[in-house]
Image (cartoon, rainbow, N blue to C red):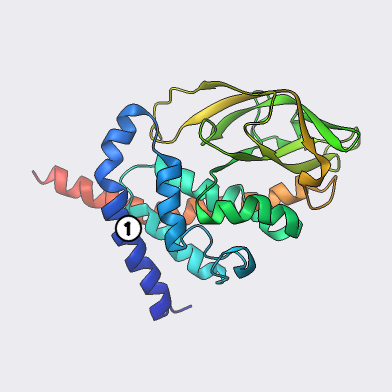
């Protein structure tokens, strides 16, 4: 396809935003091991960057995915890996299923403030004993009255120490591993949610990464995204957008690294 003036306008404006609001602070954020997600995301939300391909009724631009791809590719101009990764979680990992399958009520409660940049989102899938093998997760969400009661834990949670809510994958029944899981919106300040630790990583340092425990955490059953038992399928769809993010965001970054290497070896 050929990019339009509108595509190039997004590319140009996002690059200007990065040079003004992100790159001057990257070294400091990398050193302290965290960046101010609420502050940065609010600025991005004000520009519409957190909802480019999200529905207009929830505050998004309602554009097709090609515009989102241009946005993700332009994130490669950020001179670190952690900040663009956290942005990608916000736009392409923790919110696609909610946008596509969530009820209108749920989208107004969680998606709208995420697009505005008022909420920071995280994704709760990986566990200590279940990373790539998503079907093996052990976290449970059992019905009790009108609530789900959640027990278990998540690992490697990007933005986990700053997030306002988690898109949580949990086992909601005892059925087959690919049919017993559901996605649930989990407010991170709910009683029983414990941020166990912020991981001290070798790379991606400006992105806070957490281990999180859940002990008898209660959330209303209306926080279910879509249909119960369809969570594995929904998450596989979210993973497709996550992988597209990784591919697109890496293009410019790799070109930049090659250019930097050429410049360095010529000194």
Q: Position of residue 263 (x, y in %)?
A: 15, 48
Q: Quadrant of the C terminus?
A: top left
Using a 10 Å C-alpha cutoff, classify the residue at mark 1 as few (fewer than 14 neighbours), some (14 to 19) or many (20 or more): some
Note whether 202 is above or below 88 in the view shown: above
Q: Residue furthest left?
A: 267
Residue beneath disc 1: 17
Answer with left or right where residue 1 lies relative to residue 214.
left
Answer with left or right where residue 167 lies relative to residue 252.
right
Note whether 203 is above or below 87 in the view shown: above
Residue 163 appears in the rendering = yes
Q: Residue at x 76, y 45 (%)?
A: 223
Q: Residue at x 71, y 36 (%)?
A: 134
Q: Position of residue 225 (x, y in %)?
A: 76, 49
Which of the 4 image quadrants contains residue 122? top right
Q: Residue at x 88, y 38 (%)?
A: 146
Residue 243 appears in the rendering = no
**Residue closer to the observer: 156 or 210:** 210
Q: Residue at x 73, y 51 (%)?
A: 234
Q: Position of residue 89 (x, y in %)?
A: 54, 46
**Residue closer to the observer: 39 or 21:** 39
Q: How many labels sit on residues? A: 1
Mark 1 lies on a secondary structure that is helix
Q: Position of residue 200 (x, y in %)?
A: 43, 22
Answer with left or right where residue 156 lies relative to residue 100.
left
């Amino acid at each position: 396809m050929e990019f339009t003036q509108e595509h190039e306008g997004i590319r140009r404006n996002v690059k200007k935003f990065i040079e003004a609001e992100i790159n001057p602070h990257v070294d400091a954020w990398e050193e302290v091991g965290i960046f101010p997600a609420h502050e940065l995301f609010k600025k991005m939300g004000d520009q519409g960057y957190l909802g480019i391909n999200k529905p207009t009724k929830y505050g998004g631009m309602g554009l097709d995915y090609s515009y989102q791809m241009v946005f993700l590719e332009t994130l490669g101009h950020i001179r670190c890996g952690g900040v663009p990764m956290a942005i990608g979680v916000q736009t392409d990992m923790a919110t696609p299923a909610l946008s596509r399958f969530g009820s209108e009520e749920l989208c107004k409660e969680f998606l709208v403030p995420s697009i505005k940049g008022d909420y920071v989102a995280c994704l709760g899938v990986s566990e200590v004993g279940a990373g790539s093998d998503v079907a093996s997760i052990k976290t449970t969400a059992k019905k009790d009255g009108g609530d789900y009661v959640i027990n278990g834990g998540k690992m490697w949670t990007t933005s986990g120490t700053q997030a306002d809510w988690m898109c949580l994958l949990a086992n909601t029944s005892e059925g087959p591993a690919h049919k017993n899981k559901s996605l649930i919106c989990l407010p991170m300040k709910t009683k029983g949610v414990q941020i166990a630790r912020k991981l001290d990583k070798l790379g991606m340092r400006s992105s806070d990464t957490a281990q999180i425990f859940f002990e008898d955490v209660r959330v209303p059953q209306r926080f279910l995204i879509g249909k119960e038992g369809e969570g594995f399928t929904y998450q596989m769809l979210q993973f497709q957008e996550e992988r597209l993010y990784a591919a697109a965001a890496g293009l410019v970054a790799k070109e930049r690294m090659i250019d930097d290497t050429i410049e360095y070896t010529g000194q």
